[in-house]
Image (cartoon, rainbow, N blue to C red):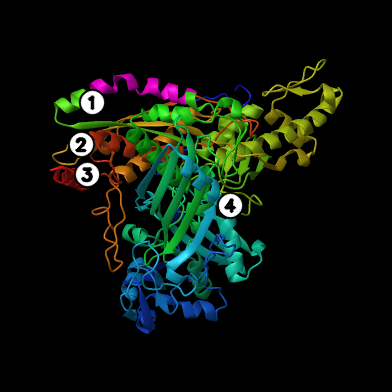
Amino acid sequence: MDKFGKSQPVTRVEDVRFLTGAGRYVDDIAPADALHAVVFRSPVAHGEITALDVADAAANPGVHCVLTAEDLEAAGVELGLEGVRIPNSDGSLGAGPLRPALAKGRVRFVGEPVAMVVAETLARAKDAAELIEFDYDELEPHVDPVPGGPAIHPEAPDNVAVDYAFGDPAPVEAAFAAAAHRFRFTIDDNRIICNAMEPRGAYAEWDGDRLHLCFNGQGVWGMKQHLAKNFGLDPDAIRVTNPDVGGGFGMKGMPYPEYFLLPQAARITGRPVRWMSERTEAMLSDNSGRGLVSEAEISFDEDLRITGYRVENLFDLGAYNSYYAQAIQTELFIKVMMGTYDVQAMHLRSRGIYTNTTQVDAYRGAGRPEAIYVLERVIDYAARELGVDPWELRRRNFIAPDRFPYASASGELYDVGEFARVLDRVAAECDKAGFAARKAASAAEGKLRGMGLCYYIESILGDPAEHVQVDFNDDGTASIFVGTQSNGQGHETVFAQFLSDQTGIPVDKIAVIQGDSDLIPAGGGTGGSRSVTTQNNATLAAVAVMVRAYGDFLAGEMGVAPQHVRFDDERFRAEGSNLTPSFLEAAEMARAAGRDDLLSFRERAELPARSYPNGAHVAEVEIDPATGVTEVVRYTVTDDFGNLINPLLAEGQVHGGVAQGIGQAVTERVVYDETGQLLTATFMDYAMPRADDLPMIAFTTEPVPSTANAMGMKGCGEAGTVGALAAVANAVLDAVWETGLHRVDMPFTPHRVWEMLSEERSAAA
């Protein structure tokens, strides 16, 4: 580890400015002369537009323009937003109906953008929006994500957007037919709202014919491509920037209508135009996450080895395809569907359903938490039905260490894994042996206590290539330009730390530059737990080039042959020379010699393979059966993230992910009524987890270095959420199993848990 990051728990350098209010978020840096935009949104879930009159709004004092779909099309702006389409089981592509930036002809969810009002002040824009005359013939909505119901798009019969299948069903059916044991389990994965601390926002401005869009997203280059397509611009005529971003979690990783409306409004008015979402507006318009029901079936032989596994999903897409939406519960779900278990007979059928609700897309983990949740729930259920220890049933079916590299049933090549060792470690860390005594103590107080285990594996996603640039500045400092994008993970710390470790340049002499499409030609942004692995891999490539280039240059200064110059991670040295310059000193020598070619290095590097973080989460819950109140009272994580660059940041990522997982498991749930109105559109109604809802989270690592990159690293950004859902749910099932209640679904709110227990008591009576 000395070569790759030294595994030091370095405190985040950016925290000082964040905690002292010196962060520069999009709403802080919008131009002082920017006009304010307000989006007029549909009040109904499904309706034919019969009238849209914006004349009074446009005439209101201080209003500069009002945009409608008709205005966009008249200006030659492409109305539709792009969305990935996944192949159906018959080879055809999933449905691709128009998703307009502003509603055209029909509205399909409450909160759909209908018009944008741009005015001198926010108050005037809001006042003008009240004057828009919007009439419609209300249509029956389709709210539940099941096939059938009122048609939303003619391109999607029965509202089925995509009907995806993976695997050969014949071996699975044969395994079921020959099985000694076979179990079927229905699992509901409740829909949630991301609720990043900073809502979405953006501003747009033109410099002549050149567009600048600043938005709080997860990368700039994808948005640049979308803008070029919709506005018919050469990419060189577009600059996209991301400033500080207060949380993304997948939700900010794709295009939204506002990012196309603002540039057109700025072009019409000749002024910069800014927009910032309010919280209820965000709940109505930001992509939701999760939202699927799975029917899982698993079979075992007489030795309790898994022989077959299949899942049928129905997943909610909302009213339109958001950018990645069709891929989440299909191509991404399948990547880890069989988890850490040595099974090849596997089949998935997954159908995406359009509903008259807000779009659903990637949320922390994007398909991997959903797949692991189903698998680990059904494994746990099977163990309890079989009367065996759920821990031992997992251990019996783990892929053995001597089976690596292992080709999974879904085509992933797991490079390394020692799952039993990680399981042993977490058993010790969580004091599994002492659980019986804790359970008895809870029972003495009239409470139910349960322990739940989840063993997860994750496949790192996103572009395996990344770009980097290292500049040596006139003032004796260095800058590293990165292609990823921090949303609060600590990139400024870890990328400077890694470059410092590889070059000896002091961390306080390194500036991390990100989020500007003018400053680096390409990048993958943040998402899929890719950032640190891909970016540091590119940094390694750049450092190797830098060392060779400076070795050749310094050979002349030292009076030795280039092959005699060596770099020891801090200084250049050569036998027979008393020159021992650091990188910064060598850069000053190069500048003095007129060697500007040695002052900037740009490289691109691609990982040869993906890494597969994995680990075990153990939750303990305590339930008061009289009230249904469910508390997560202990939580223990042992992860295999390979080699860690900064353990402190990795632990922070796990804590945040676990908090989001516990939130979904215990408190959070999106609820629409039968008319498609969102009932959970404020924090009065949508229960975000608070600090007192969370226990202390114990974190340890049991590293098995990856062979898929030179650093031996594995991504960690989403792992906390991937493991948390099933750990909590299995703990609840363990707590109530002896009452006769054998099925429980998230979220475990007091009323839902009380109701489940009451119904079981009534049934038993």
Residue 551 bears which disc, if any?
Answer: none
Whole-percent x and y of residue 585?
70, 28
Amino acid at circle 4: Asp
Amino acid at circle 1: Lys
Q: Residue furthest front?
A: 178
- Asked if the residue at tag 4 contacts the one at tag 1, i.e. Cβ–Cβ closer than 8 Å, the answer is no
Whole-percent x and y of residue 523?
62, 49
| Range covered by the magenta-colored residues | 421-439
Label 3 SS? helix
- Vertical side of 603 occupied by 227: above or below: below
Q: CA distance from mark 1 to mark 4?
A: 54 Å
Labels 2, 1: front one: 2
Q: CA distance from mark 3 to mark 2?
A: 13 Å
Can see residue 117? no
Answer with mark 1 or mark 4, whichever residue precedes in sequence.
1
Q: Which residue is mark 3?
A: 753
Q: CA distance from mark 4 to mark 2?
A: 58 Å
* Residue drawn where x is 86% and y is 22% of the image: 560
Labels 4, 3: front one: 3
Can see residue 348? yes
Camera-side residue: 463 or 207?
463
Q: Which residue is mark 1?
A: 439
Q: Which residue is mark 2?
A: 739
Label 1 SS? helix
Whole-percent x and y of residue 707?
63, 31
Residue 516 bears which disc, if any?
Answer: 4
Answer with mark 4 or mark 2, whichever residue precedes in sequence.
4
